[in-house]
């Protein structure tokens, strides 16, 4: 495959670009880059527009397969009966990647390997049929899963990513003869993050440059893996995709130090001069994030959070107590931002009464503060999940309980004020 590309005189260059944070523009129609752990978004470009995703579809098919195994609906060594539809696909080497042997059964594990390494469309279809009984049923299940993740109006018509024009009569009911799967770059990032975080063992498959299939050897389409034309150290997945509608696409992941990035590039540019255009764009995006972003301690343990006021104390010898962070708070910072330029939103445990004495310094929990850098307009992939950027606040000092007579008097006064 690589030799053919060279013979055609197409460039396999991989540009390394160190771009300024405020001027970087990835060479693709749409893109996104996120932190796999927290879901922090580092870069977006037209991330919400639904576009063709071609064989990137197979990471969703993979997720549904892992989920079925986890739920004990499937076993990895279960044998799959190959349908006539799937067998016909496998015999067209332009569409399948691997041929099925007539009458032979393949295991769930073998089919998943073929779908992710060789991008075998027939293997993806066979997995869908095994999981749901039919590919249309599988599409319905997959749509339901996407909606659970907050992906609105997912446009899916099959488990492979092929255009319907290649499937004949075996298309999703009601779909057009030239229909194709379409999701946004953000949608794909959500799927990829769930797949990697929920089933990290998938990376043992996607990091393979080659794998066995019957008496042949499958080869990956991911040129960023070892011994491939666009190799980059640390990349261990995830999935390519190409159709006329989608263009060159790639959802990639790289582990560098303690950080795992997920990048999505849809419809890469410069494909007429660069056969590795999607990987060139991915390299640009990975370089941009790693050059411009870092996770740093924004608030240290035992230090007050800017903007979080002292909290009222009931039944104590002091009326108020200052609050401090219970742990170091690490947040994502772009290199051109100031460490202290953040804002905090505090939510107390008891907003009406405050804390109740006795209070123990750095032990008594007062609430939590969500911390956001003022210049951060990108936020997190799951905007509703504030746990990833919050710190628990505790009392800074001890506050002893007032004597019981004073407590009783205060309670009586408060009762009178409430009733009158």
Image: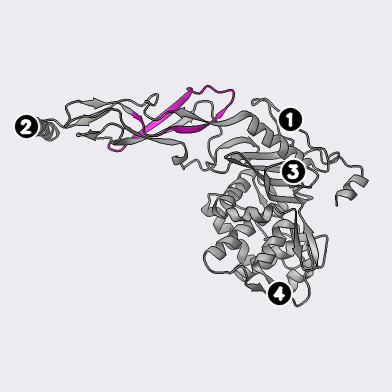
Horizontally, residue 93 falls left or right of residue 259, namely right
User: Mark 4 or 3 closer to N-term?
Assistant: 4
Please state the horizontal and vertical placement of residue 82, each as a whole percent of the image: 71, 73
Q: Quadrant of residue 30?
A: top right
Q: Can you name the residue that lies furthest to the bottom here?
A: 103
CB contact under 8 Å: marks 1 and 3: no
Q: Is residue 73 shown above or below 40?
A: below
User: Mark 2 or 4 closer to N-term?
Assistant: 4
Residue beneath disc 4 = 105
Horizontally, residue 317 falls left or right of residue 130, namely left
Q: Residues within 10 Å of mark 1 (few under 14, many from 20)?
A: some
Q: Is residue 346 magenta?
A: yes
Q: Which residues are magenta?
A: 324-350
Q: Can you name the residue that lies furthest to the left here?
A: 405
Residue beneath disc 3 = 267
- Which mark is nearer the camera, 4 or 3? 4
Cα separation between marks 2 and 3? 74 Å
Cα separation between marks 2 and 4? 82 Å
Residue drawn at the location 47% of the way across and 28% of the way down: 298
Disc on res. 17: 1
Please state the horizontal and vertical placement of residue 165, each as a whole percent of the image: 78, 60
Q: How many marks?
A: 4
Residue drawn at the location 73% of the way across and 30% of the way down: 17
């Amino acid at each position: 495959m690589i030799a053919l590309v060279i013979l055609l005189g197409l460039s396999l260059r991989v540009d390394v670009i160190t771009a300024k944070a405020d001027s970087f523009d990835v060479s693709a129609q749409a893109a996104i880059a996120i932190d796999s752990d927290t879901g922090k978004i580092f870069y977006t470009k037209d991330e919400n527009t639904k576009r063709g995703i071609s064989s990137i579809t197979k990471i969703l098919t993979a997720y549904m397969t892992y989920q079925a195994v986890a739920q004990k609906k499937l076993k990895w060594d279960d044998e799959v009966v190959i349908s006539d539809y799937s067998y016909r696909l496998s015999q067209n080497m332009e569409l399948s990647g691997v041929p099925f042997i007539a009458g032979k059964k393949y295991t769930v594990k073998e089919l998943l390997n073929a779908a992710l390494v060789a991008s075998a469309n027939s293997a993806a279809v066979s997995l869908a049929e095994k999981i749901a009984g039919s590919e249309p049923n599988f599409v319905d299940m997959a749509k339901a899963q996407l909606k659970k993740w907050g992906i609105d109006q997912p446009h899916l018509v099959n488990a492979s990513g092929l255009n319907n024009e290649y499937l004949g009569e075996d298309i999703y009911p009601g779909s057009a003869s030239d229909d194709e799967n379409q999701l946004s770059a953000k949608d794909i990032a959500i799927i990829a993050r769930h797949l990697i975080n929920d089933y990290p063992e998938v990376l043992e498959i996607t990091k393979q440059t080659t794998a066995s299939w019957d008496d042949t050897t499958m080869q990956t389409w991911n040129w960023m893996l070892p011994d491939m034309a666009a190799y980059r150290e640390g990349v261990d997945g995830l999935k390519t995709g190409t159709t006329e509608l989608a263009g060159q696409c790639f959802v990639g992941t790289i582990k560098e130090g303690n950080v795992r990035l997920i990048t999505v590039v849809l419809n890469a540019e410069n494909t007429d001069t660069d056969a590795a255009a999607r990987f060139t764009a991915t390299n640009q995006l990975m370089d941009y994030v790693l050059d411009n972003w870092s996770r740093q301690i924004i608030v240290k343990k035992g230090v007050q959070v800017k903007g979080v006021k002292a909290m009222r104390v009931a039944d104590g010898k002091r009326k108020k107590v200052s609050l401090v962070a219970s742990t170091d708070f690490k947040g994502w910072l772009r290199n051109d931002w100031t460490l202290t330029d953040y804002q905090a939103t505090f939510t107390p445990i008891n907003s009406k009464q405050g804390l109740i004495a006795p209070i123990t310094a750095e032990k008594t929990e007062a609430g939590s503060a969500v911390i956001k850098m003022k210049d951060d307009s990108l936020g997190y992939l799951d905007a509703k999940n504030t746990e990833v950027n919050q710190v628990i606040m505790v009392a800074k000092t001890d506050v002893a309980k007032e004597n019981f007579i004073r407590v009783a008097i205060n309670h009586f006064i408060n009762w009178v004020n409430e009733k009158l």
